[in-house]
Image: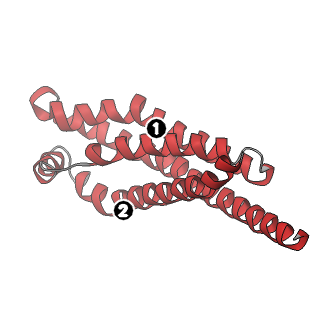
Amino acid sequence: MKTIQRLAFPVVTAYLWVMMILLGAIVLETFMIYPNVFADPPASLELAMDFMSVSAPNDFFPPLGFLSWVLGAGALVVCWRVEAARWWILISLVMIVCEGVASMLYFWPRNEIMFVEGSEVHSAEYLKQVAREFETWHWRSRMGFNALAAVSAFVGFLRFYRHRLLSQCALSEKA
C-alpha cells in the first residue's frame, strides 16, 4: 500500500500534464493549423500535405493519446481510494477514450481520404464535403471531449492533492 501511495502523486501529476498538453495541442491545431488546411479544399489540402511532409499531427497525437489512456488508467488505479478524486479521473479517462475512439472511427478515415488519397482518387467536390464534415465534427466532438477530459483531470488532481495534504496534516498532528 505504501508503494501505491508513493506512486500516486507522480502518476496523477503525469496524467494531468499529458492532458494539458493534449488540450493545448488540439486548441493550437484548431485555431492555427486547421484554418490554413481547410481554407480552400482541395488546393489547401495539397498545400498542407506539402507543409506536413516531415512531421504531421498523425505523428504526434496517436502516441500521446495512447499515453493519456495508460496514464489515465494508472491514475485511476492509484487514486481509487480517494473518492473525491476517483470520479473526476474516471470522467476524464472516459472522455479521452471517447475522443480517441471517435478519432479512429471517424477522423482517421477522413484524413486518409483528404491527405493520402486526395485529388488523385476523389473529386474536388467530394474533398470539400469531407473537409466540411471533418471541421464540423472536430468542433462538436474532439474539442468537447478534450476540454472535458482536461478539466476533469485538473479537478481530479486538485481533489487528490487536497486529500494528500489533509492526510499529511492528520499524520503530523498524531505524531
Residue at the (22%, 37%) spot, across then down: 114
* Label 2 Cα neighbours within 10 Å, binned few <14 / some 14-19 / many ≥20: few
Q: CA distance from mark 2 to mark 1?
A: 18 Å
Nearest the camera: 124 or 60?
60
For this orientation, the residue located farthest to the front is 175
In the rendered structure, which disc, 2 or 1, sits on the residue that comes first in sequence? Answer: 2
Q: Position of residue 78 (x, y in %)?
A: 66, 46
Q: Position of residue 32 (x, y in %)?
A: 31, 63
Residue 46 against residue 174 in the figure, above or below: above
Residue 28 badge = 2
Q: Position of residue 153 (x, y in %)?
A: 61, 55
- Describe residue 127's horizontal placement relative to residue 171 as left or right: left
- Which quadrant holds the N terminus? top right
Task: Tell me the amino acid under the disc marked 2.
Answer: Leu
Q: Quadrant of residue 160?
A: bottom right
Q: Residue at x 23, y 58 (%)?
A: 36
The residue drawn where x is 20% and y is 46% is 41
Q: Residue at x 69, y 48 (%)?
A: 79
Residue 167 vs residue 171, the one in the foreground: 171
- Considering the numbered disc 2 on the image, is that residue within a helix, a strand or a loop? helix
**Numbered label attached to residue 113:** none
Which numbered mark, 2 or 1, is in the foreground of this view? 1
In terms of secondary structure, where does tag 1 sit? Answer: helix
Query: Which quarter of the image is occupied by the C terminus?
Result: bottom right
- Disc 1 target residue: 100
Please indicate whether residue 45 sits to the left or right of residue 149 in the image: left
Q: Is residue 151 above or below residue 45?
A: below
Q: Amino acid at mark 1?
A: Gly
* Rendered position, 113 above or below 15: above
